[in-house]
Image: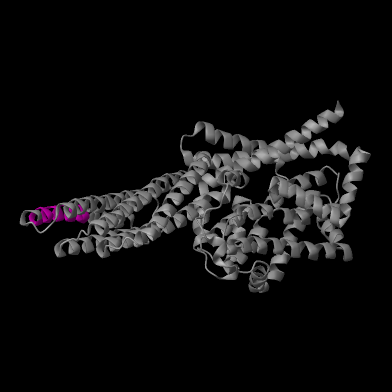
């Protein structure tokens, strides 16, 4: 019965610890995920500032994986260079040590108070933003309660010869590193795995001489989250994860060698002889700070090495229809790292929609020219682009339907909903461009010609349509002013449609326009007007999103 009690206490403590981490992550995502994204987006190329920002953000969100995932997303979308990413990753590795230091402070006695205050904020206060902070505080309390439960339940394990024999094998550097890597890769949180290691140390089951190697392996295991996030991304995004992995491999080799050849472990024990949790936290901090100091001057070298490991490949691999920015399997990825993923996919959705808008603009230009030149050969290229637009609409819509279920941040939820409507409107613009192009074949087969006046009006329709799409792709600093411009342009397109219909009637009365040409021109005017309507729909949705976003 005693063995069962120990197991239940251990599992219960682990459950509370991990759930506390999840509560904090969810609260931080809802309260500050977008803010973290904006700070990273506006980062300069200064290496010291990059390390500082990476460390502070990771300390706040308590997840180096989340910070690295955001960086992977920004590199993939072209908003951050690979060299900027290096400094952020270095800082993130320092910032992730804050959780271990908090545990080492032994504030477990205050944990019930944190949990009570946090729950009270969620239950008794109405403001959603207060609920997010309540979740953060309650999560912190639950985390420490779980930590205390794990430590208490594991104390009898030091009397179990079999368990002691297993843990003693961790003193073998290779075994210790492997165990730390695999366990952290499994739960995908170095903060959580380090906390569990601290609980083992507090209960007296493992000493620092064995724990250090597990600790070093945990730093390698935390890279798995970013590796998963980089699946399906650009070459540079994959190189970002390679740099993250190289950083931790270098630190592991360096500190493993130091612990074997020097009395580093004994020195760290002597600093806090009666506080095993502090010993692990201090070694974790030392590992990341020293590794960062040593590699800081070599950041550009890490970039070159990553490019050597993952060289540029031929563009043939990118032939065919594909998503250029969005990471696949969003639901699975979201569950693995809730904080960084939201900031990443909002940016990538915007990039993918800008790409889609560019294709729609290209087809409008192609299709109007096909009509003016009466050239059916241009239809083939237009049809291929239209098929691509249909593909992107389907893939982006499916992607959004998967991620929106998990979205907790109100601002991001609004953006995702707007992007869902925007992708449909871009696809409809492509449809109307294709309608215009299809008139070419009939004109060619029946030798239909527009009058010089009608041709001039078609040229003007093309110019205004392209002007509308160019306006949609502009950077938006003042959404109200920008929306007013788009609305005015859409009204001009409506006015032009009415004017050109009146002009058509005059040409019909004069007999300067054939029946078939009149029918085609009338249909073309309808498509032109609809392009303006969908452009306005896009602008209205775009204006509903915060003004810091650019392009679509």
In the rendered image, the vertical position of residue 551 relative to residue 402, given as above or below: below
The residue lying furthest to the right in this view is 161
Residue reaching furthest left?
Answer: 510
Q: Give, as a single range, the part of the protein colored magenta.
A: 491-507
User: Magenta part mainly helix, strand or loop?
Assistant: helix
Does the magenta-highlighted stretch encompass residue 545? no
Give above or below for 486 relative to 329.
below
Tell me residue 421's x, y (percent).
Answer: 38, 45
- Left or right of residue 260, residue 369 in this image: left
| Residue at left offset 54%, top offset 42% | 133
* Image label count: 0
Q: Quadrant of the N terminus?
A: top right
Residue 492: within the magenta?
yes
Quarter residue 312 falls in: bottom right
Front residue of this view, candidates 240 and 356: 356
- Residue 334 is left or right of residue 170, and the answer is left
Out of 198 and 438, give the one closest to the viewer: 438
Q: Residue 189: give x, y in percent of width and height.
A: 68, 48
Taking the image as shown, residue 506 lies to the left or right of residue 384, namely: left
- Image location of residue 66, percent across then percent down: 61, 52
Asked if one can make out residue 551 in the rendered structure from this viewpoint, the answer is no
Residue toward you, 186 or 454: 454
Residue at x-position 81% and y-position 55%: 177
Image height of 450 relative to 501, above or below: below
x, y (%) of residue 259? 85, 62
């Amino acid at each position: 019965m005693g063995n069962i009690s120990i197991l239940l206490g251990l599992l219960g403590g682990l459950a509370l610890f991990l759930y506390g981490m999840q509560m904090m992550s969810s609260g931080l995502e809802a309260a500050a995920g977008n803010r973290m994204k904006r700070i990273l987006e506006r980062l300069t190329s200064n290496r010291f500032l990059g390390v500082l920002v990476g460390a502070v953000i990771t300390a706040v969100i308590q997840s180096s994986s989340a910070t690295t995932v955001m960086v992977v997303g920004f590199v993939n979308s072209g908003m951050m260079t690979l060299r900027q990413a290096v400094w952020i990753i270095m800082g993130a590795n320092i910032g992730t040590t804050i959780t271990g230091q908090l545990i080492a402070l032994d504030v477990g006695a205050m944990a019930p108070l944190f949990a009570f205050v946090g729950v009270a904020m969620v239950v008794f206060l109405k403001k959603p933003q207060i609920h997010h902070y309540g979740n953060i505080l309650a999560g912190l309390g639950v985390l420490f309660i779980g930590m205390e439960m794990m430590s208490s339940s594991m104390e009898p394990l030091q009397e179990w010869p079999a368990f002691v024999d297993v843990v003693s094998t961790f003193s073998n550097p290779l075994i210790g590193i492997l165990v730390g890597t695999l366990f952290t890769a499994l739960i995908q949180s170095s903060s959580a795995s380090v906390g569990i290691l601290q609980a083992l140390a507090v209960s007296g089951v493992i000493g620092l001489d064995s724990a250090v190697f597990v600790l070093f392996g945990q730093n390698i295991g935390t890279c798995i989250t970013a590796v998963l996030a980089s699946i399906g991304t650009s070459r540079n995004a994959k190189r970002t994860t390679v740099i993250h992995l190289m950083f931790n491999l270098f630190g592991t080799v360096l500190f493993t060698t130091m612990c074997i050849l020097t009395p580093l472990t004994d020195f760290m024990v002597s600093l806090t002889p009666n506080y095993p949790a502090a010993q692990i936290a201090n070694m974790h901090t030392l590992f990341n700070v020293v590794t960062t100091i040593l590699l800081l001057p070599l950041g550009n070298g890490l970039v070159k090495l990553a490019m050597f490991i993952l060289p540029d490949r031929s563009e043939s691999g990118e032939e065919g229809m594909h998503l250029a920015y969005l990471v696949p399997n969003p639901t699975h990825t979201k569950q693995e790292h809730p904080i960084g993923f939201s900031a990443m996919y909002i940016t990538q959705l915007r990039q993918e929609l800008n790409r889609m808008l560019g294709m729609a603009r290209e087809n409008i230009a192609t299709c109007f020219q096909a009509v003016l030149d009466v050239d059916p050969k241009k239809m083939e290229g237009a049809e291929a682009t239209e098929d691509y637009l249909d593909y992107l609409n389907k893939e982006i819509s499916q992607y959004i339907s998967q991620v929106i279920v998990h979205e907790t941040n109100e601002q991001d939820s609004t953006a995702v909903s707007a992007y869902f409507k925007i992708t449909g409107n871009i696809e409809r613009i492509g449809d109307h461009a294709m309608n215009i192009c299809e008139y070419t074949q009939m004109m060619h087969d029946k030798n239909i010609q527009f009058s010089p006046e009608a041709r001039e009006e078609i040229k003007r329709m093309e110019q205004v349509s392209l002007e509308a799409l160019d306006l949609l792709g502009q950077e938006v600093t003042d959404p109200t002013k920008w929306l007013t411009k788009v609305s005015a342009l859409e009204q001009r397109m409506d006015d032009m449609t009415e004017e050109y219909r009146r002009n058509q009637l005059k040409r019909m009365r004069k007999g300067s326009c054939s029946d078939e040409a009149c029918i085609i021109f009338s249909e073309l005017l309808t498509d032109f007007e609809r392009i303006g309507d969908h452009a306005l729909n896009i602008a209205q949705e775009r204006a509903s999103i915060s003004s810091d976003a650019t392009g679509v």
